[in-house]
Amino acid sequence: MNRKILLVVASCALASQVYAGGNTVSLVETVVPVPYVAESHVEEAHHPASKYYVVVKGMTVLGADSTHGHDTLEGDQGYGVGIDVGYRIGNGFAVEYDFSYSTNTVIETDLEGTSHEGDASYSTQALFLVYTHHLTDTVGLFVKAGYEYETEVIDDLGIDSDADGFAYALGLEYAMNTHYTMLVEYESADIEGPRGDAVFVGMMYNF
């Protein structure tokens, strides 16, 4: 009877332990609870921290030929600054108010071929609808279309005029981080004048 009891005890001991190279290895796996770690939300670089943004940019006006009465105006390349204030309304769309100020030199030629030169200044205000399509997490392509109002002053030539019309732009942006985005932009309008089209390089700040 005692022998049977010892055999039962020995069998239980062997079932719970294995001897390998003199080391005792437990056959019962110890389960260590692993605490659940929620995935942190990583905001993509092109997703702004806020719906509001502002852009400060330098600009080059390319100049253009136009008419003033019977005279011809020829504008050369000039420079200026601009600022945009925008609000994102969702699905890649935004509404934007743009202001710019630029200058260049204009040559006026009359019917007799006599030319006069003057320094011109231009101030523009525009209201745009903007759509941005993100090509990658950091690179986006945007287009603008809307209404622009321009004031043109050339004191040396006795010109002080206003004009308005349809304006549009195409640009590329690169998100450096959540708040700062670099961009380049080409803008044109159906407003006739010696200012011509404009090229902008700027920095956007997302609030």
Image (cartoon, rainbow, N blue to C red):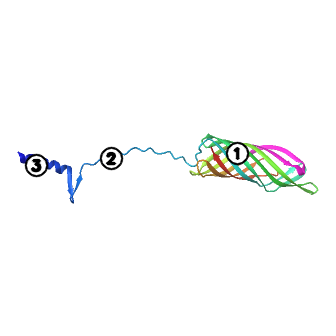
Q: Which residue is mark 1?
A: 84
- 36 lies left or right of 18: right
Residue 123 visible in the shown view: yes
Q: Provide residue 14's location: percent of width, then percent of height.
A: 17, 51
Q: Which residue is mark 3?
A: 7
Specify the segment rendered in magenta.
147-166
Mark 3–mark 2 contact, CB under 8 Å? Answer: no
Q: Provide residue 190's location: percent of width, then percent of height.
A: 77, 47
Give the CA separation, mark 2 to mark 1.
Answer: 57 Å
Give the CA separation, mark 3 to mark 2.
Answer: 34 Å
Look at label 2 and name its amino acid. Answer: Val
| Closer to us: 22 or 14 | 22
Q: Which residue is mark 2?
A: 32
Which circle's residue, 3 or 1, is located before the other in the chain? 3
Q: In the image, what residue occupies the spot 33% across and 46% down?
A: 32
| Magenta residue check for 87 | no
- Residue furthest left as drawn: 1
Look at label 1 and name its amino acid. Answer: Asp
- Residue furthest top as drawn: 89
> Which structural element holds mark 1?
strand
Which circle's residue, 2 or 1, is located before the other in the chain? 2
How many numbered discs sit on the rendered protein? 3
Give the CA separation, mark 3 to mark 1.
Answer: 90 Å
> Which structural element holds mark 2?
loop
- 151 lies left or right of 199: right
Is most of the magenta stretch helix, strand or loop? strand
Which circle's residue, 3 or 2, is located before the other in the chain? 3
* Quadrant the C terminus occupies: top right
Look at label 3 and name its amino acid. Answer: Leu
